[in-house]
Amino acid sequence: MTHSKSKNMVMKKKATIDYVKKWASVQRGEYSRFKKGLKSKITPGQIAKLDGIGFEWISPKRKNILTAHDEEEGDNFMSMSPGFTEKKENNDSWELMFEQYKQCNPNTLD
């Protein structure tokens, strides 16, 4: 493999990881809105799938700055679902990104 092909592959992988990191950040934001009962694009089924793979709802970078009060609120989100909205067209792209997320190393996704 030539140096330029190798460099292109590394750049492509980094771009994919950056894109997946952004997607993960959006999921955290939508989850936060969902928990507060606000209109959100994330569905209970998507939350369950992310929980099933050990998705960290709090970014590793933010864990250090949370207060004890924030941590006490925990994951009691299912009773806070009035803001839930579901759109079929968004679900297909969500599933694709979910699969890509599972393929990446979660330790690099903050």
Image (cartoon, rainbow, N blue to C red):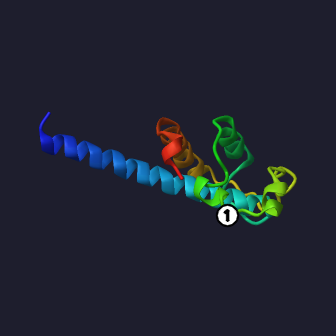
Report which quarter residue 98 is drawn in: top right
Image coordinates of residue 36 in percent, x first then y, are 79, 64
Residue for point 66% across, 54% down: 58
Image coordinates of residue 43 in percent, x first then y, are 70, 50
Q: Residue furthest right?
A: 79
Query: Dot 1: few (<14), some (14–19), or many (≥20) neighbours within 10 Å?
Result: few
Q: Nearer the viewer, residue 36 or 55?
A: 55
Q: Residue furthest left?
A: 2
Residue for point 74% across, 47% down: 44
Residue for point 52% across, 54% down: 23
Question: Could you say whether the residue bearing mark 1 is in a helix, strand or loop?
Answer: loop
Image coordinates of residue 39 in percent, x first then y, are 73, 65
Q: Residue furthest bottom?
A: 38
Amino acid type at image mark 1 = Ile
Residue for point 65% across, 38% down: 54
Vertical comparison of 41 with 46: above or below: below
Q: Nearer the viewer, residue 73 or 25?
A: 73
**Image label count:** 1
Specify the quadrant that holds the N terminus: top left
Q: Nearer the viewer, residue 66 or 98?
A: 66
Horizontally, residue 34 falls left or right of residue 92, namely right
* Residue for badge 1: 65
